[in-house]
Amino acid sequence: MASMVTSRPVLVVALAVGLAWGVGAAPGIVSAQIAALRPVPGTDCPLFPANNYWHARVDSLPAHAASARWMANMHPASDLHPDFGPSFGEQEVPYGIPITVVHGAARVPVAFDYADESDRVPYPLNKDTAIEGGRNADGDRHAIVVDADTCTLFETWNTRQTSAGWTAGSGAVWSLRSNKLRPRSWTSADAAGLPILPGLLRWDEVEAGRVDHAIRFTTDVTQRAFIWPARHQAGSTPSRAFPPMGARFRMKPGYSTAGFSARAKVVLTAMKRYGLVLADNGSPWYFQGDADPAWPADLIEELKRIPASAFEAVDTAGLRISPNSAASR
């Protein structure tokens, strides 16, 4: 389930049909908190509640005790790589993970390879659903669909439409108004068992000058463990010298942003305030964004200058309120 080389295009596709399957809102979520968030593009839906882990600032938290050990095994001499942007004809769509928005679309059954850890409900997939890399792509083939009528998020990995119907490696469903986590040890469309959508860097937010959430990223070797709020691991080593799924990293406060453009500084500011969340195995320090054709090529090149050595792991234990909730202090 890794973004090993590239990602796919970020288009927001609006569709309309009938039938809805909703998930109730979590109690205790204040509407004023939700209003403070930038909504999912093309909807009035929050990108999860304002007190969700993805929106928690980590710039004042202590560094993790294992930060130096983890960083030493994460290719610290490499640079970050934006896993999105123009594909220059290498594939039929831009790199990045696309977001499809529907309005009460009809839902269909999906056959899952990992059925025991997938949400086995109908998904709003059809011929217009955008798939990472395009319909003929190899790779992860993620599909992210938001039903704007119910603020329900559907995500699948290795998504395919066959003559017999839709298939996927795994699938997960969330209410965007809830902090509820998946059952412990369950995967999602991501190895960490987390939603992908809230960790995507989107062009609309960078263009607007504010990113209010952490960013999803990958590395090649991970520990066979996960930490809150991750629910699942796919590590290849028991060694604690490697990071577990769910580990959070931030850009060090002293890293200078001088010489970067205003738009690049929006991204760097988010990396200092909200950081990066290790969500899957893949190419080291690849961070994911939406497959929007508007991403400027010069900005993508600029973001490739960010050194991995500018980052440190953060101790997020103090953010946790409940082990089964993504709500944070």
Image (spheres, rainbow, N blue to C red):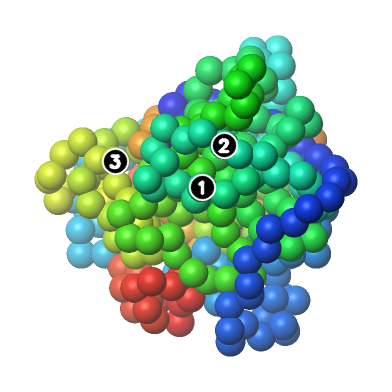
Q: Does 328 sit above or below residue 46? A: below
Element under label 1? loop
Q: Secondary structure at mark 3?
A: loop
Q: Earlier in the sequence, mark 1 or mark 2?
A: 2
Report the side of 22 relative to 169 (left or right).
right
Front residue of 244 and 116: 116
Secondary structure type for disc 2: strand
Q: Quadrant of residue 303?
A: top right
Q: Residue furthest top?
A: 89
The dot on residue 110 is 2
In the image, what residue type sits under mark 3? Ala
Q: Around disc 2, counting alpha carbons within 10 Å, would you say few (fewer than 14), some (14 to 19), or many (20 or more)?
A: many
Residue extending furthest toward the left = 239
What amino acid is found at the position of numbered circle 1 in the picture? Arg
At x 72%, y 83%, the residue is 31
- The disc at residue 244 is none
* Residue 82 appears anywhere in the view: no
Q: Mark 1 and 2 residues: CB-CB less than 8 Å, in contact?
A: yes
Above or below for 193 versus 234: below
Q: Position of residue 307 (x, y in %)?
A: 43, 41
Nearer the observer: mark 3 or 2; the answer is 2
Q: Amino acid at mark 2?
A: Val
Q: Quadrant of the N terminus?
A: top left
Mark 3 and mark 2 lie on one chain; the one further toward the N terminus is 2
Task: Give the spatial CA distance, label 3 vs label 1.
Answer: 21 Å
Give me the disc on residue 120.
Answer: 1
> If the image is split into quadrants, where does the C terminus sit?
bottom left
Front in this rendered view, residue 71 or 96: 96
| Numbered tag placed on residue 234 in the rendering | 3
Residue plotted at (72% across, 84% down): 32
* Image coordinates for residue 55, horizontal then vertical, percent: 56, 68
Which quadrant of the structure image shows residue 250?
bottom left
